[in-house]
Image (tube, grey):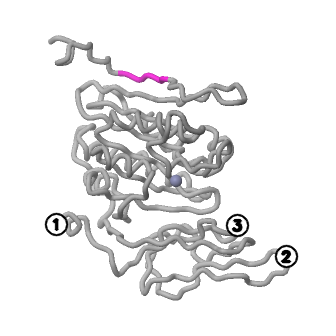
Amino acid sequence: MSDTTATGTPAAQPGRTIETVPVTRVDSGHDLALTVHRLTGARPGPTLVAFGGVHGDEAMGPEEIRRFVSSVDPAELAGTIVAVPVANPYAYAAMSRFTPQDGLNLNRIFPGDRNGSVTEQLAAVLAEIMLQADYFVDFHSSGLYSTVEYSYIMDDGREMATSFGAGLLYHHEPYEGTSSAWAIKNGIASTVCELGGGGQLTDAFLDKAVRQGRNMLKGIGMLAGAPEAIVERQTVMTELVTLRPSKGGTMISHFTPDRLGEVIKGGTVLGEVVDPYTFETLEQLVAPYDSNILVLSREGYTRTAPGDYGFMVGNANTTTTVDELFGT
Ligand SMILES: [Zn+2]
């Protein structure tokens, strides 16, 4: 059999490569570049593009990508995995959601601008990398002090979200400027995995990312075998709210990350902000819906700034199922 594709270009040999994709020269004289891993499978198949570290304070993503990509043997793979483990190197170095050089949130400015600031240029290069994808997955987590678990289910990407197997899915119109919005605009099936963070239960979340990521590869035909049912039931949330403290201080959480997924009665105090100087209670964060599903929470005691992620809850009364969502 000839080792050429229909267009006459030689087919890539199965294996792993690491490529450095230049972004720009910054004012410190450093050359900013993205490190891109490419796994070429032994059999033809679709291309999955995976990002980690779009938000620099979400350290789980890069490690999840490292373990997930390392777990796949090119000999067992159909198609290609293109992975960018650290999508925003300066934000990763600063452990920040925002790029220090220009203060921008990379996940609000896709598809970026090749003539723009550092983050705008990063977005432009990442947006180009995404265009080779049939499937796109973005590995996020919570930040330094909170822990989260759910995945997005998009109109295009049902197999990804169901085979990845998070118990909680969220269906919504993605925010303008996110990688998901760019995927949708270009007809790329996608999901976003929100797994872990806050230094809590990290081993369990990292193991899950590998197991669920490999299951997703089965779901989209890149690994042999049928995807296993990871959870008994997947709940699709259609309303999700972030509760942010308006005051800074000490956050006392009454719902630690081991309780994620729990259904909580409306009006329950999820946590409170206490003044570490005077000891007074400054604010209470209260479950807003009649019935609430805990999606993001904090360990018992953390420092908090105004506007931080405090808790996230879904409305338990407006959930649906994957079958209902797709009318099947
Ligand atoms: Zn994120």
Viewer-nearest residue: 86 or 97: 97
For residue 16: magenta?
A: yes
Amino acid type of the residue that numbered disc 1 sits on in the rendered structure: Gly
Q: In this figure, which residue is indicated by the disc labeled 1? A: 327
Mark closer to the chain start, 1 or 2: 2
Q: Is residue 272 left or right of residue 114?
A: right
Q: Which residue in the rendered view is the most extreme toward the right?
A: 277
- Residue 182 in percent (x, y) is at 38, 47
Report how far apart the C-alphas of labels 1 and 2 lie in the structure. Answer: 55 Å
Q: Which residue corresponds to mark 3?
A: 305
> Mark 3 falls on what kind of element?
loop
Segment tinted magenta in the rendering: 15-19
- Residue 113: x and y in percent read 49, 38
Ligand 1 lies under 8 Å from the Cβ of mark 2:
no
Identified by mark 2, the residue type is Tyr
Residue at image position (48%, 24%) is 18
- As helix, strand or loop, the secondary structure at mark 2 comes to loop
Is 190 magenta? The answer is: no
- Tag 2 residue: 277
| Residue drawn at the location 38% of the way across and 37% of the way down | 130
Residue 294 numbered tag: none
Q: Kindly check if marks 3 and 1 are in contact, taking CB atoms under 8 A apart as contact.
A: no
Q: In the structure shown, which secondary structural element does the residue marked by tag 1 occupy?
A: loop
